[in-house]
Amino acid sequence: QVQLVESGGGLVQAGGSLRLSCAASGTIFVFNAMGWYRQAPGKQRELVAHITSGGSTNYADSVKGRFTISRGNAKNTVYLQMNSLKPEDTAVYYCNGVFVPMNYWGQGTQVTVSS
């Protein structure tokens, strides 16, 4: 059974940094792509950042220049370095892995940015 486990969330003041990590277990394949999504209260889940197995990245406009997504050396690991955090970044952050046509999700990690 494939599982994605996120870590690294927490409470931080505006302007601070956090690094989220996600590691998959139970896989015998390499994800085609991995990404981070977030969902704030009362809002739809939205893409934050995405990275393909070839290293191509894509970011939401709201995080460009502040967040960096990267894949780890270990199979099916992904990180999200978040700098210059803003209160509007507060949300539950979800790790996503795609192995076409399957889509896998982690349970989420809370990120709270205080003003």
Image: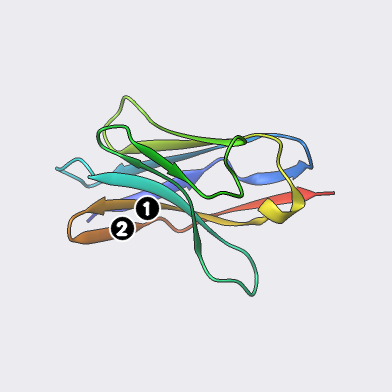
The residue sitting at the right extreme is: 115
The residue sitting at the top extreme is: 73
- Determine whether, in the image, residue 46 is placed left or right of residue 52: right
Q: Split into 4 quadrants, where in the image is the N terminus?
A: bottom left
Residue for badge 1: 96
> For the residues marked 1 and 2, what is the alpha-carbon distance in whole angstroms?
6 Å
The residue sitting at the left extreme is: 28
The residue positioned 30% from the left and 28% from the top of the image is: 74
Residue for badge 2: 104
- Determine whether, in the image, residue 48 is placed left or right of residue 83: left
Estimate how packed mark 1 is, as few (under 14), some (14 to 19) or many (20 or more) residues with alpha carbons within 10 Å: many
Mark 1 or mark 2: which comes first in sequence?
1
Amino acid type of the residue tagged 1 in the rendering: Asn
- Determine whether, in the image, residue 81 is placed left or right of residue 30: right
The residue positioned 20% from the left and 40% from the top of the image is: 30
Q: Which of 61 and 79 is in front in this view?
A: 61
